[in-house]
Image (cartoon, helix red, strand yellow):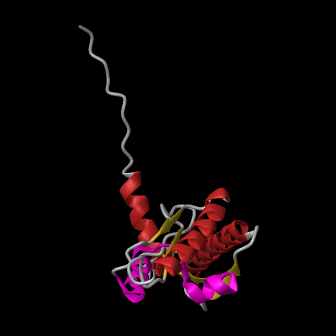
Amino acid sequence: NEQELVWATSWGVSTRLVGALVMSHSDDAGLVLPPRVAPTQVVVVPISKGPEKAPEEHERLMAYVQRAVDEMSASGVRVRVDTRFSMRPGPKFFEWERRGIPLRIEVGPRDMEAGTLLCAKRTGGDKFSLVLNGSFGQSVSIELEQMQSELLCAAEARLEERSFEVASYDKMR
């Protein structure tokens, strides 16, 4: 019987990095996740009366949503569709904002008729429309990369603003 040392390391990286991420990017409205680390990068919220009240319109809307989801998935975007039609849109928007989903896409019958989808960034700013065409998935990917860059630049600026060099121990005190 020969003793052998344990092969293990523990740097406490997982919880510390998650904490740093939350402290660095979140705001008073909740979590803000950078797109590259967000488990779900985009949530699509179909605005429908529901399958019971307007089945034909709902079916057309959901086919439109599926087309958008397929294009995003083909571009490597992690996307989820909120199909809780018993909830009003406002509470859904609040929940996804609080969870830190980087991009929320709203789509209703008017958007479908116009061939667009309405987008809202978790980082704020005005809502904007994207056209559902062959490059829709790429457009969403570009928006997510732009958000990633903006979050990184903002974090670097905060670090630079709050960091300073101390010339002597007396000045540090």
Q: Nearer the viewer, residue 96 or 171?
A: 96
Q: Nearer the viewer, residue 141 or 152?
A: 141
> Is 95 placed left or right of 152 in the picture?
left
Task: Tell which residue pokes out farthest to the bottom in this image.
Answer: 126
Tell me the residue at 61%/79% (across/down): 157
- Work out whether residue 88 can be spotted: yes
> Is 107 placed left or right of 173 in the picture?
right
Task: Tell which residue pokes out farthest to the front in this image.
Answer: 56
Q: Is residue 22 above or below residue 111?
A: above
Tell me the residue at 45%/83% (across/down): 54
Magenta stretch?
87-116
Q: Nearer the viewer, residue 169 or 157?
A: 157
Q: Check if residue 145 falls in the magenta segment.
A: no
Q: Nearer the viewer, residue 30 or 45?
A: 45
Q: Check if residue 97 falls in the magenta segment.
A: yes
> Residue 129, percent across and down?
66, 85
